[in-house]
Every structure is written in structure tokens, then in C-alpha cells.
Amino acid sequence: MSRASDAPAAPVPDAGRGSFLAAYGIWIALAIVIAALPHIFSSGLALSMMSVMGTMIVFALSYNMLLGQTGLLSFGHAVFFGLGGFFAVHLMNALSGGEAPMPLIAFPLVGALAGLVFGIVVGAVATRRAGTAFAMITLGIGELVASSALILRSFFGGEEGISTDRTDLIQPFGLTFGPQIEVYYLIGAWCFVSMAAMYALTRTPFGRICNAVRENPERARFIGYNTQTVRFIAFSLSGLFAGIAGALAAINFEIMNSAQLGAAESGSVILMTYIGGIGNFAGPVIGAILVTYLQFTLSDITDVWQLYFGLLFIAVVMFAPNGIAGLLTLQEPLIRAGNLGRVSLYYPLAVVPALVALAGFSLMVEMTYRLSVGGSEMSFLYVPLNARAPLPWLAAIVLLGGGGWLFLRGARKVGQVYGDAVQEGLRR
Amino acid sequence: MTKKLALAAAALSILGLSAMPAAAEGTLKLAYVDPLSGGGASIGQIGLNQLRFIAERINAKGGVNGEKLEVVPFDNEVNPQKSLVQVQKAIDQGIRIIIQGNGSSVAVAIEDFLRKYNERNPDKNVIHLNYAAIDPILTNEKCSYWHFAWDAAVNIKLEALTNYLKGQKDLKKVYLIDQDYSFGHSVADTAVKMLKEKRPDVQIVGNEFHPLVKVTDFSPYVAKIKASGADTVITGNWGQDLALLIKAAADAGLKVKWYTFYAGGAGGPTAVKQAGLADQVFQITEGINNIDYKPAQETIRAYMEAYPKEPVYYPRLFNLTGMLFEAIEEAKSDDPAKFAPKLEGMKYKTFSSGDEGFMRADDHQFFQPLYISTLEPVDTKTEFDEENTGWGWKEVAQVPVKDTITETTCKMKRPK
Amino acid sequence: MFEIVFISTLNGILYGMLLFLMASGLTVIFSMMGVLNFAHAGFYMLGAFFGFEISRRVGFWPGLVIAPLLVGLIGMAVERYGLRRVHRHGHVAELLFTFGLTYVIQQAVEMVWGKLPVDYEVPRSLDFPAFTVFGTEYPAFKMFELLISVAIFLVLLLVIKRTRIGLVVQAALSHPGMVAMLGHNVDRVFMLVFGVGVALAAVAGVIAGPALVTQSNMAGLLGPILFVVVVVGGLGSLGGAFIASLLIGLLQTFAVASNASLADLFGSSASAGALQTYLSDIWNVTVAQVAPILPYLLLVLILIFRPRGLMGTRET
């Protein structure tokens, strides 16, 4: 874990001019990508989805400050996301008509402040404990806030929530923020800044102490750190960035609703962060992008998408505890040894049977679902079939069983080849 | 690495989009944005089934204006922000008619979103047809030209209900119990106001709120109702909150009349039957299956052939689609900008009884006769049961359209 | 007055015991294995649906035995092939594993039984009022619930404190190496404990199913209340969970009976300005209105002021 927890390509800023590109190249590239994306994907949906992704990247990264960096499992992180958004919306409404010199682009600061303040308040209580007790406190606080949100209707707007008009503020440089593209760039900019800030934070001594508290609180205490204070600071800062994300969501949708600070939203950020990988800075970013994408598209393909989602999550917890980013960092020693190309030739041995088994499994799931909602005619991967007939079931069993068996064999082989290659790389 | 993945994911998203068939010539697509997964999915699925049934029947007759109908479902998990992305998705696919119902939170979000969208895209309007969200705010403070509502709003239902209760002489003490959120409060506030006006002699002996879907044990609430000596309970509760309340009341042997909004909602009939409260639970709706009106009964039978597990649950979806198709045919166009004016003020014979209702132009609220009905074991006069319980709704009274009219504060902004 | 107090106490005890019935398995698993099973409510739901399915074929009573056995077997399989694997990644991974399981169970139930509530009925033999107090009937089925709940408590207490099995299980958590040395299969002990805990959840499901609503979202709607019971009682303490259940049951029931609000206590708020609208929300909320969320407040307060819970022996 400890190795993978270091962020990729650790830049060393104090090396000479030549390594400037090595140190900051990835950030420059990131900025270019953020700027260029809308020119590649310009449809309305792509823009809204990328806006949501940007928001979720900040949210997931802020969550990982707790789970990944400090080892704190929180079940109530959406509280800060939601409160950040609500405060931003309220201020936008209060300043509507452009009465105050505060342009839209500054509003994530409101979310940040709200997130920080509530992070401090809640953190003072919650971070007195770690581990399971901490998880339970956050669960309780999340439940408390979500339930209260429906009761305190003036502030949270009841069922309808609070809506706002983002264009109704002062508009310097003629930026109305009416068109989605302008909002995308606003979110992109904030996402970039937040990412950089959170990354920088992991490089500071404080970030390192957080890691120490995660790995071995006793030893951290021994060398003179108050683990509770460390947890508290991490928690507050994480609230700050969650608040930024909430404000970005508020700007994007122009509406905040009590659903945004509930258990479902908190659960969703856990899924994102963990599936992406908590041991790596890029993990939550990958997770946020992937999970957001799946959330919006999987539901078009299947009604039981949440089942696949849950299974994906369990699979990651069981087999790839460092998430997708962890799987990617596994390739690093191969790249260094220069034999990734050769080893990756073996990957299809495991991947193809896995896909076959997956197809068999989801065929079973879909047929079961079809039978339970009534009717039997359906189509799977564009193949029409009858869920009551024995043949598709037989096919599903064969696919699942055969694919599974081949996968186990293939995976063993791949594991061997991988291990040998890494050994070989080390010997060199 | 981040960059690569972002690219790959974005590329996928485009692939995902282009994999969807582009709108074929001669199809009219209707987006159905409702919960299809998660807690609210049971009712969302029923609505989708009904809509598909309607579309198939219309297509069998040659479609609307020669165009075939296609219902495209979008799962919103009753989450306002998710709904907006789904609406955006629908718009990207060239769909310009959004049908949505469950959750006033979602309805308000979509109404707001489309108001802005239509302002910003005046040549490409999108219309929002709401079949179930009944927060009065939708047709009052927030009313929008691009939003039409087919279910009677809370205040309209209560206007009708209190007009019916005006004549109920055995009504003396009323207890109100509602979920503690905006809908529950608007039920309670309106009921108190209207009862005071129409039946000043009736005592309101309790006005209780409890948190939304957090209560497992309703016996303490039932004890309170019992202690108050109420003979009638009015509640806007739905889902588990209604089922558990009614079962707890039956367990404690509480004998009152229940006037509800959602006893017919998913799980309601099952709970009422389990509680054994025949003829004690009432609902107010725009129609029930057991009304002696031939065309409706035939359609319901046909529907149950296609979907054997359930009778018609949303008569208003028939009203909605019927009026929509009539407006499109009249306007000879499926462009919302052209057919929306035809909907305004349209008169329509409702699905359940054939009595006439009308779409008020001032606030785009459909007014229709409403029915007070009660649940009891089906007998010779009633044909359809609910949720396979063997119990079905029986008409108690029809509240004519004129007794359902309420005022609106809507100042409709029409496009120029 | 006496009437209200009496009825509230009775209702509170009944509700508290229902909570204990639901939470007993959770606390068993936590005290023996140190795993907080997030999917507990999911297994409870499985129990309800299995109970429903069996009861409509062969009757309620066989269901009460068979459903927990089946669910227990599923639980053992989950432990053997899932939980054991993540065990070495620590408690956070275990918690996350069971968290993911909640999604899967919920979806699986939805796929098989659909999304609408099923008609799971109280057995005929218990479908009558047991007694009537102050004009309020108390159904026999609720008394049965109470009985089972108390029985489970006593049996568990006996098994854990007084039998050899209980000793071995307890030792397996704190000194797994030593227990293995003495010739016990620690893995199998854990598997059995998980199976039993999950089977207890299923018993609760079979019994609560007919009394409440048996629907695919019942696990989600139950919410984290069971964690409140277990944490307030003191993580891993059976007696604590028992007392916490009663406490929460009574707290909630008496709160519902009260109509006091801050406005009653301090008079209506006099402050003017924009804040007032926000404040008036808080000011006018009655105790009854927030009764069902009081347990969560209790949870937070307990964790601040008495972190090991009412009767816990260790701090997490």
C-alpha cells in the first residue's frame, strides 16, 4: 500500500531548469486537456456531463483527503457538499441583479467557506475518534443533517429546493455564464485549481503526517504528533474542498436540493473514490469520471444498473483494493523494465474470458429481471431472445462457466508472466 | 495518466451517444423522465408501462399526424440534478416533449431548467408535461408557459375534498397527520384553511408532522389520534409512511375515517387490505378503474392483457397523451411552440368517465371531475382489484369540475 | 395523564424490543468478529422475503425456521468467499465490502420480487388482539415479537457467557493465534458467527415483515437506526444493545407524545430581520416533530461524551 500511495511521477521542484517540464508537465497537459475537451466533445450532453465530472472530481478528491490520505471512512461527506452549494445559492439570490461586485466565478469561495466552517464544527466532534466510531459519527451526523434539511424549509427550500439564476449577477468581461460552455470553463478552472491545491497539500509535511496517522497512529503519536489534531485539520480542509464542489454543482444546475446532502450522495462519493483507487492521487479523478459516466449512461442500457454497480464495487474491494489507479500503477515496474509490451500481450488471456463470463452473467441477470417484471421477449447485445426458453439460459451458463474457468487459468498465467517480468526487471 | 483516462472516458461518452439511433424520419419521440431504479422505481415503472401501452395502440392506428410514437425512458432516481442531465440528454437526442411526474422537487427543477432553456433557445423549444407532481407552486409562483399539469394540485384536491366533506354531517373532529416536508405542510395548511371556511363547526383536534420515511413504529402517533377523540383523519402520507400508519391504527383498533391522497399509491391497497379496513380508507383521485364507463373499462381490460399484474394506475396519463396528440394534430406540427397554444384552454372528455375537463390557460392546470373512492373487497359491481389483493376502489362521490376550481396567482409569461 | 404515560411506556417497550430484535445479530457479529456489518439490514430484508415466500407455500411457522437457516447459509458463504478475503485489508475494507453488499442485496431482491410491496400476512393463529388497555388494542403478534426478542437476548447471553463455545468465540477475536493453537479452527468459528448473526437478522425479518411493509426498499428505509442502537449500547455489548434499544424506543415514543417547542419554552422569537424566517423554522419545531431523528442526536452526543457507549468495554 505504502508504495502505491505515493502520487505518480513525484515532481521534485528543486531540480534544475531542465526538469521544469518533468515537474509541471503533467499539470500543463491537464490544463490543455481541460481547455481542449469541449472542442472535441461539443454536444450539450457532453458539456453537461463534463461539467458534472469536473464537480465530482473535486468532490471525490476532497473525500480522498479523508479516506485515502488520513484513513478516515466517512459516511456523511455530502453534508459539506450540500451546505457549500446551499450557501452559494443563497448568496447568489441575495446578490441577484448585480448589486454587489461579486462575479459568478467567485462563488465557489462561498462554498469553500461554508464547507470549511461546517468542517470545523463537525470535525471538532467527529475527529475525536477514528476507525469505526468515526464512521458511525459521520453516519449519524449525515442522517441528522439530511433529516433536518426537510424540516428547516426556509433555508433548504423544502422539497423543491432553492433555485437561482446564475446569469443574474454582475458580468465582467461580458461573461454571462448563460451558455453551458462558459460554465464548463468555470468548473474546469476551479477543478484545476482545486486539484493543484489538493495535490500540493499531499506534498507538504502535513500531508505526510496524515499518511503517518493513517498507517500507524500510535507511532505518529510517539514522534510527537497529536493524531486528533491531524485528523481535525484534514477533516476541515476536506470540508472546504467539498464545499467548493457543492458550489460548482449549484452553479452548474442552478438549483440545490436537500437530496444533495443525503446518504445517497455520500454513498456515491465513496463508490467513486474507492473504485478509482484511494491509494493514488489520480484514483479519485478516474473514479469520478468513470462513475459519473456510468451513472448517466448505464441506466439507458439496463434497469438493474445499480446491481452491476454494487458488484463492481465489491469486486474492487475484494480483488483490487487500490482501485483502477492501483491496477495502472502495477504496470509501472514493467514500463521501467521495458517489457510492458511483451507482458501486455498476455493480458487478453485473462481479459477476454472475463468479458465472456461477464456477458454470461449479465445475460442471466437480465433474463431474471425480464421474467420478474413480466413478459419474456427481450434483446441482449442486440440479439433478440425469449427469457422463458431454455436455450438462452444454457448459453448463459456455458458463457459464465466456460468464461470463468478460462479466466481462472488465464489469470494464473498472466500472474506468472507478470511476476517473472517484474523479477526480471529487478534483476537488471 | 489522468489525461489519457479523461480522454478515453470522454471518447466513450461520445461513442455511447452515437450508438443511439438518430431520430428516424417519421417518429415522434416522447422522453419519459422518472425513477426507474431505486426506491421510487415501482411507480416509475408503472407509468412507463402505461405510456408504452398507449404508444403501441396509437401506432397500431397509424400514429399521430402519420408519425410513429416512441417512448424513450430516462432514469432520474427522483434526484433533481440527475433529472436535469437526463433532460439534457433527451434534448440532445432531438426530443422536445418531456413527460415527467414523480417528485415535485424534480418537477420544479425541470420547470426552471426549461424556462431558462427555452428563453436561451427560442427557436428550439422543449415542453414539460407533468402527470403527477402536485405541489401548487408549479402552477402558481413558479408557473411557466412550457409546463402543463394534469394531476390536480394539492389545493385543488383539497378544495374538492372539503366541498365533499361539507355535506358529511357525521364529521365532527378532524386530525391531520402529515410528513414533515413541504408537501405535507401544504396539505395541512390548506386543509386547515378550507375546513375553517366551509365547516366552522368542525374541530381540528390535531395537526401532526413526522419526519419523512423515518418512522418505523406509528403506535405512539395512533395513541395520540385516539386520545384526541378524532372521527376523521386527513393525511397526505404516501408509501411506507401511509402503510405503516394505517397498519398501526388497525392494530390498535382505532376506528376513524381516513381521507388520503395516496392510499391508491404503490403498496397502499396491500396495506389497507392487510389492515382489514374495508370502507374506512378513502382517496381522492381523478379516476378509478371501477367506474361504470364502457370505453375506459375496455381499455383497462386491454391494458391488463398486456400487463397482467396491474390495472390502470394513472388515468391521467391517458388524458395527458390524448390531449397532447389532439393538440399536435390540430397544429399539424410536433413543434411545442406550435402545439402548446392548442393545449391552452383545450376541453377534453376524461378517460375515466367521459366527463369534460379543461386545461386552464392562465396557469396550465387541467381541471377535471375528481372522485372520492373507498377500498373494499371486489364484488359483483366492481371488476378490478388492486395489487392482486382482491380489493378494489369503489366510487363514493364525484366532485364535479365546478367544485374543484381554485384561484391561481400565476402571471404567465408567454413567448412573443 | 397516567393513560398517556402508561400507553407510551408500553409502546416504547414494544418498539424498543423490535429494535433489539433487528439489532441483535449486528451486535453479535460486531462483538465476536469486530466487523460492523453494513449489510445487516439487507439480510433482514432477505429474511422477510424468504419468510414471505415460504409462508405462502407452507405457512408462517416453517418460514420462521427455514428462512433464517437459508439466510444464515448465504451469510456463511459471504463470509467464506468474500469477507475473509478482505479481512486482511483491515476494518475499513470490511466495512466497505458490506457497504457494497447492501446495493447488491437490494437489487437482487428487486429483481426477484419486484419493486412493489408483497402481501406478507400475519399468521392466522396470531391475528387477534391479545388485550385491550384504555381502549387501545394490542395484537397478539406484537406480544410474540416481544417474546422472541427477549428469548433471543437471554439465549445469546447464556451462550456467550456460560458455554464453552462462547468462550472460544470470544477468545478467537482477541487471541486468534492462541485459540488456533488449542486446536480450534478460527476461520470456521468466524464463519459460524457471521452465519448466526445474519440468521438473527433474518429472524427479525421474518417477524417484522408482516408487521411492517415487506418491500424491496425496506432495508434502505430502515436507515442507520440499528447502528445507533449498537453504538449507543457500546460496540459489541449485548446487554448494552438491549438497554439502548429500550432507551431509544422509550425516548422516541415519549417525544412523540410531547408537543413542546422552543417557542413554548422561551416565548415566540422576537428578533426581527432576515434571520428570523430561518430561525422560526427551528423555533417552532415541536419535540414530536423531530422524535424519529432524536436517536441520531443521541448517537452523536453519546459518542462525544461517552465514546465507549453505555456499556461498552473498549473504545472501538
Image: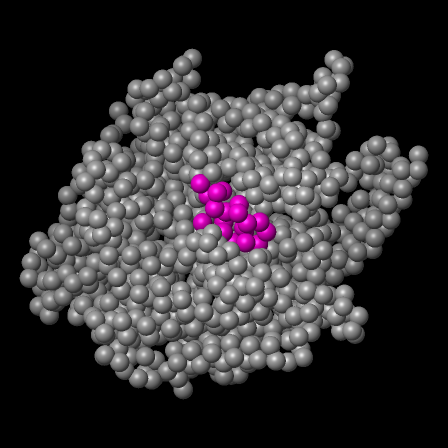
Residue A335, percent across and down?
82, 33
Tell me where the magenta segment starts and ends, as one range.
A121-141
**Which quarter of the picture shows residue C17?**
bottom left
Q: How many marks?
A: 0
Of C267 and B302, nearer the camera is C267
Q: Residue furthest left?
A: B201
Q: Looking at the rendering, in which quadrant would you find the N terminus of chain C?
A: bottom left
Q: Is residue B330 left or right of residue B369?
A: right
Q: Quadrant of the C terminus of chain C?
A: bottom right
Of residues B201 and A126, the one drawn nearer to the viewer in this rendering: A126
Q: Is residue A330 visible?
A: yes
Which one is in front, C128 or B87?
Answer: C128
**What residue lies at 43% left-to-right and 63% top-to-bottom?**
C116
| Residue A126 falls within the magenta-colored stretch | yes
Q: Main secondary structure of the magenta part?
A: helix
Q: Position of residue B388 (x, y in %)?
A: 39, 71
Find out whether residue B99 is within the magenta segment.
no
